[in-house]
């Protein structure tokens, strides 16, 4: 019989010492022992990668993994919503999307459990964020994913939810070492959240991008955000919505654009998201470049009476491109807009509420008006003129 593609992959990587277990009897114990050998493993870290946990629907299993085994969790952009980001051990996202606490905890790990992973460029920070000496346990339903970027020590071809269910069935009380470390991480996160909450409302002359998600949370309220649905976009300013705790998403509360793909996907996708989940608060956080590409869908949102809020972070530029041009001797070519549509006027002409925010004190009343419009099933667009603030991932 001719070898299948996965057999070829397995045989090739087996030669490099990779152990593969294909759902056979005994694999959960082997995997659990690898995760939980307290004599050798001090810092275990679980990473949801490339949306595998979301596709598997393993939300409860991932929460239990964090709770019962005291394992901190980070997600990729595509995996946001795998765990409620208010969870004490949910430390945000990886790679380009690291915040300080998440990066420090990740790099301190000596074992990584990677769920549904490709370990690609953005999720690993161009492959530079790998804890030194850490072992890797990788679970993926696609055998071709193993060794694509990082070669695991143990690879398990399985559905993420099924594999985590098997691991949890073997759970035993955590060692005091794991409990203590989890408690320390949770306290470090609480301190960092307090730091961010203090940082965002500081008085600035111009609107700071990082303060927009925080003000949105404040105005729309914690109860509304329990069922909120965030549509991410692709760009430099909207990157701030990827960084938890600047914006924190609940379980299944994020629709990412495939970790930086088609600009405008979130703008158009918000329409579909609100149609699919009409009872939920839907917000799209977009840069001006991405918004220009699909703002024609505002008429669709108005026609179907979809209470969506669009927060357009307007720095009059294609910020990601401009960032790289800045690093290349500051020669800007076709990345800045001296002529820009009036997004608020376009919104009004499209049957939506349109508001322009030019100063920090104008942001809260504009958000309050957007909330009122959404309650009446009317879309709202806030054209927010922001300082050209570099996101953390570009400074790492």
Image (cartoon, rainbow, N blue to C red):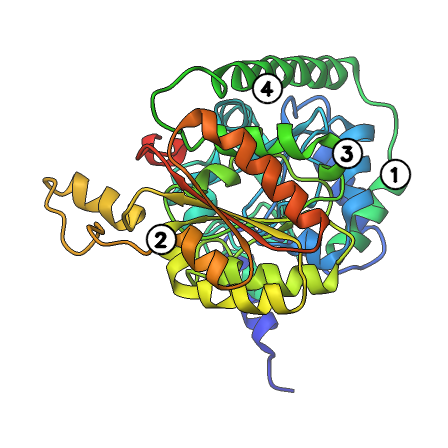
Nearer-N-terminus badge (4/2): 4
Instruction: Describe the element under mark 1 as helix, strand or loop.
Output: loop
Nearer-N-terminus badge (2/3): 3
Give how far apart the Cα atoms at labels 1 and 4 are: 33 Å
Residue annotated with mark 3: 223
Give how far apart the Cα atoms at labels 4 and 2 are: 35 Å
Nearer-N-terminus badge (3/1): 1
Q: Residue at x 42, y 33 (%)?
A: 209
User: Is residue 89 positioned above or below 388 on the image?
Assistant: above
Residue annotated with mark 1: 170
Residue 221: % across, % down: 70, 31
**Viewer-side label of 2, 3:** 2
Q: Residue at x 69, y 27 (%)?
A: 89
Residue 382: % across, % down: 48, 45
- Regarding residue 281, the answer to whether it shows in the image is no
Instruction: Classify the position of the C terminus by image quarter.
Output: top left
**Viewer-side label of 4, 2:** 2
Q: Is residue 213 left or right of residue 376?
A: left
Q: Residues within 10 Å of mark 4 (few under 14, many from 20)?
A: some
Give how far apart the Cα atoms at labels 3 and 4 are: 19 Å
Residue annotated with mark 4: 193
Please give the label number shown on residue 342: 2
Q: Residues within 10 Å of mark 1 (few under 14, many from 20)?
A: few
Q: Which image quarter: residue 245?
A: top right
Q: Residues within 10 Å of mark 3 (few under 14, many from 20)?
A: few
Q: Residue at x 79, y 18 (%)?
A: 175
Q: Residues within 10 Å of mark 2 (few under 14, many from 20)?
A: few
Nearer-N-terminus badge (2/1): 1
Give how far apart the Cα atoms at labels 2 and 3 are: 33 Å
Instruction: Classify the position of the N terminus by image quarter.
Output: bottom right
- Regarding residue 80, the answer to whether it shows in the image is yes
């Amino acid at each position: 019989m001719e070898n299948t593609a996965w057999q070829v992959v397995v045989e090739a990587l087996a030669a490099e010492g990779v152990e593969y277990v294909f759902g056979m009897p005994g694999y959960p114990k082997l995997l659990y022992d690898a995760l939980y050998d307290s004599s050798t493993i001090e810092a275990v870290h679980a990473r949801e990668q490339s949306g595998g946990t979301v596709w598997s629907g393993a939300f409860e299993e991932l929460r239990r993994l964090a709770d019962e085994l005291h394992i901190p969790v980070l997600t990729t952009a595509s995996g946001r919503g795998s765990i409620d980001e208010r969870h004490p051990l949910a430390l945000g996202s990886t790679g380009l999307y690291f915040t300080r606490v998440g990066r420090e905890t990740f790099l301190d790990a000596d074992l990584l459990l990677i769920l549904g992973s490709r370990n690609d460029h953005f999720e690993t920070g161009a492959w530079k964020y790998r804890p030194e000496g850490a072992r890797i346990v990788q679970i993926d339903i696609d055998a071709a994913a193993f060794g694509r970027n990082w070669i695991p020590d143990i690879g398990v071809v399985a559905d993420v939810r099924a594999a985590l269910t098997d691991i949890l069935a073997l759970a035993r009380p955590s060692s005091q070492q794991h409990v203590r470390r989890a408690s320390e991480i949770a306290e470090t996160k609480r301190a960092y959240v307090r730091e961010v909450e203090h940082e965002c409302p500081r008085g600035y002359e111009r609107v700071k991008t990082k303060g927009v998600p925080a003000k949105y949370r404040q105005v729309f309220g914690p109860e509304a955000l329990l069922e909120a649905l965030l549509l991410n976009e692709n760009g430099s300013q909207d990157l701030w919505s990827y960084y938890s705790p600047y914006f924190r998403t609940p379980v299944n509360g994020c629709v990412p654009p495939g970790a930086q793909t088609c600009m405008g996907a979130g703008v158009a996708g918000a329409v579909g998201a609100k149609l699919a989940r009409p009872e939920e608060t839907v917000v799209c956080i977009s840069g001006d470049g991405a918004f220009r590409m699909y703002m024609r869908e505002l008429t669709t949102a108005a026609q179907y009476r979809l209470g969506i809020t669009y927060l357009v972070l307007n720095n009059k530029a294609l910020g990601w491109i401009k960032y790289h041009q800045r690093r290349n001797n500051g020669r800007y070519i076709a990345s800045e807009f001296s002529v820009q549509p009036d997004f608020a006027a376009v919104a009004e002409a499209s049957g939506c509420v349109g508001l322009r925010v030019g100063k920090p004190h104008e942001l809260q009343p504009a958000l309050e008006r957007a909330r009122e419009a959404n309650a009446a099933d009317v879309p709202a667009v806030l054209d927010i003129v922001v300082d050209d603030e570099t996101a953390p991932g570009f400074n790492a």
